[in-house]
Amino acid sequence: MGMKMRNNVVLVSGLLVHDSGKTWLTYSLLRAASKLGLKVSVYKPVAGHNAWYHYRTVVRSLELRALVGNDVLTYHSILPHEPIEKMNPVDLLLAPPSILPYLPKEIEEYLSDLESQFRQVVVARISNCFTGEHRHMYVPENLERLPSLLRTAVKKLIIELNADPIDVHSLVTHIQSRDIEKLLESCLEDLEMNSDLVIVESFNDAIIPFFSLLKHLKLLIIVSPGHVLVYDSIDRIIDIVRVETSLHGVDGYRAFHIIKHLQPREVIDLEPMESIEMEQRSAGKILDMILREIKA
């Protein structure tokens, strides 16, 4: 890519598939850094959200005429002038299938499909963070499997977004392609060069949203309930990811592989919070540590 890296990128990953606390911590760090007057950027390269459990995102996507998830809407409330495509170039809308076709004897298959993102992705957005152009796509076979009232709402969104039909295999292949990785890295480099601090949030329990991100990192933070694990041995992390993915394929990207092989440099406790809007006292301590590392 040719740009000089500034070593101001911090990655927040989660140990658990759901509810590790990545978004809560990222939000707290973003708010604390903004209060200090820092030029801070947040970057969620790949996001996913559920049309049933977070129906608000369907409504807001209709209003914005761009697919956008709950986490990015939360970050946008702090950085309202930052374009959504710069915060989040790739977004996936998931939705659960209707249970009715599975009744009565295929209930186990239904539960299995609820664990599969491939069986649930219905709409996708890929955006160019430089031009602001959005490309929306939808998966007809998954759309037709939705509960009828939800399907009607999602179809309205698809029409409003002027989304193109695509099959699941082609969509996944495209998102995992080298072209998309280059796009994601270029977007990161732009933020890196124009910010004091870039906070990147991964997705689910993936240690990284794309491999080339690793060479940009100053620190890796893995969040688990009640604790933050801080890692600074980036070269060692790269080696671990390479070995684990060669052994386990995409499963090698899961965060627990790092924890299994590498001792954290520091562990910071997190207090429980009633809502994401509450001030996370631990965030100040974590931000101080981050800023010391960036200046070092």
Image (cartoon, rainbow, N blue to C red):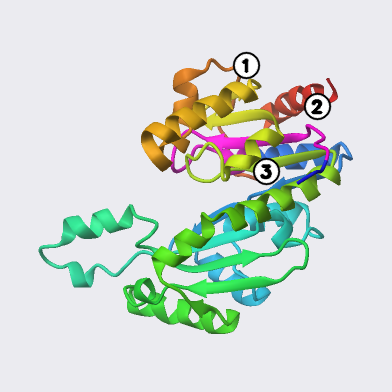
| Residue at position x 56%, y 40% in the image | 208
Q: Is residue 246 left or right of residue 266?
A: left
CB atoms at circles 2 and 1 under 8 Å apart? Answer: no
* Image: 242 above or below 198: above
Give how far apart the Cα atoms at labels 2 and 3 are: 19 Å
| Residue at position x 68%, y 34% in the image | 215
Pinpoint residue 142: horizontal percent, then vertical percent. Answer: 36, 71
Instruction: Tell me if residue 10 is in the magenta stretch.
Output: yes
Q: Farthest residue toward the left?
A: 105
Read off the residue under disc 3.
27
Pinpoint residue 239: horizontal percent, then vertical percent. Answer: 54, 25
Q: Which mark is residue 294?
A: 2
The quadrant holding residue 193 is top right
Q: Which mark is residue 40?
A: none
Q: Nearer the viewer, residue 193 or 20?
A: 193
Closer to the camera: disc 1 or disc 3?
Answer: 1
Give how far apart the Cα atoms at labels 2 and 1 are: 16 Å
Pinpoint residue 93: horizontal percent, then vertical percent. Answer: 49, 64
Q: Nearer the viewer, residue 50 or 196?
A: 196
Type of the residue with mark 1: Glu
Quadrant for the C terminus, please.
top right
| Residue at position x 51%, y 31% in the image | 241
Q: Is residue 69 left or right of residue 258?
A: right
| Residue at position x 64%, y 50% in the image | 44
Read off the residue under disc 1.
266
* Image: 125 above or below 196: below
Type of the residue with mark 3: Tyr
Closer to the camera: disc 2 or disc 1?
Answer: 2
Residue segment shown in magenta: 4-25
Q: Earlier in the sequence, mark 2 or mark 3?
A: 3
Give how far apart the Cα atoms at labels 1 and 3 are: 21 Å
Q: Is residue 39 left or right of residue 43?
A: right
